[in-house]
Image (spheres, helix red, strand yellow):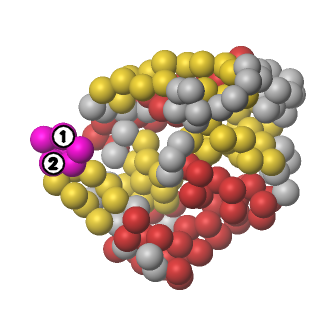
């Protein structure tokens, strides 16, 4: 589901604060830069508020944020809805025993790790990232959480690149996005 199809005036403010950088990090990529959104306190707050309004009262016990930009949006959402924050990190960043999941990106491949014990069986989890492109990162995040026994309730992203059809790879899990790529 896309909030950008709703009539909420905050969506236009959020969309207008996302800068598009051509040919970054590789030729042909239209990078959706959220750093300009973060520089606008109102647009940043509106972004968090829209997610909190959606997830408050949904009995979500864990918000899993994908490194690195999911770390920006995930913790304030988790705090506001009374859930714990679970960092999903790049390889070799977490001490101790981890679950590991490799995945393909729009422009390469990568890996996510999560501490064993970060979520318990039966927990209700929300996966948060800044953007969905091909869906590989969100799928890896869902796989990590589900291997630990959590139920992934939904995935939430600020931006979707609909042409890449990443939502089609989410195994039927709902996706909530605020804006579509420019």
In x, y percent, where is residue 171?
55, 23
Using the image as rendered, state which of residue 36 and residue 96 is in the foreground.
96
In x, y percent, where is residue 41?
53, 80
Give the overall secondary structure of the magenta segment: loop
| Residue 53 showing in the rendered view | yes
Element type at mark 1: loop
The stretch of residues the image draws in magenta is: 23-29
Q: Which residue: 32% across, 55% down? A: 32
Q: Which residue: 34% across, 46% down? A: 161
The quarter of the picture where the C terminus appears is: bottom left
Identify the image quadrant of residue 135.
top left
Identify the image quadrant of residue 49.
bottom right
Element type at mark 2: loop
Using the image as rendered, state which of residue 74 and residue 117 is in the foreground.
117
Residue labelled with disc 2: 23
Identify the image quadrant of residue 16.
bottom left
Residue labelled with disc 1: 26
């Amino acid at each position: 589901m896309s909030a950008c199809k709703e009539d909420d005036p905050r969506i236009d403010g959020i969309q207008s604060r996302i800068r598009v950088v051509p040919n970054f990090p590789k030729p042909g990529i239209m990078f959706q830069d959220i750093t300009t959104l973060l520089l606008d306190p109102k647009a940043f707050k509106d972004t968090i508020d829209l997610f909190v309004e959606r997830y408050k009262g949904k009995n979500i016990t864990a918000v899993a944020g994908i490194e690195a930009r999911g770390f920006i949006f995930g913790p304030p959402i988790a705090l506001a809805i009374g859930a714990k924050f679970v960092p999903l990190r790049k390889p070799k960043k977490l001490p101790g025993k981890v679950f590991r999941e490799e995945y393909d990106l729009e422009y390469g491949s990568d890996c996510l790790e999560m501490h064993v014990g970060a979520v318990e069986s039966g927990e209700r989890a929300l996966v948060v990232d800044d953007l969905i492109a091909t869906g590989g990162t969100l799928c890896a995040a869902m796989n990590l959480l589900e291997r630990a026994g959590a139920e992934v309730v939904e995935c939430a992203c600020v931006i979707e690149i609909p042409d890449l059809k990443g939502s089609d790879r989410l195994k039927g899990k709902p996706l909530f996005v605020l804006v579509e790529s420019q």
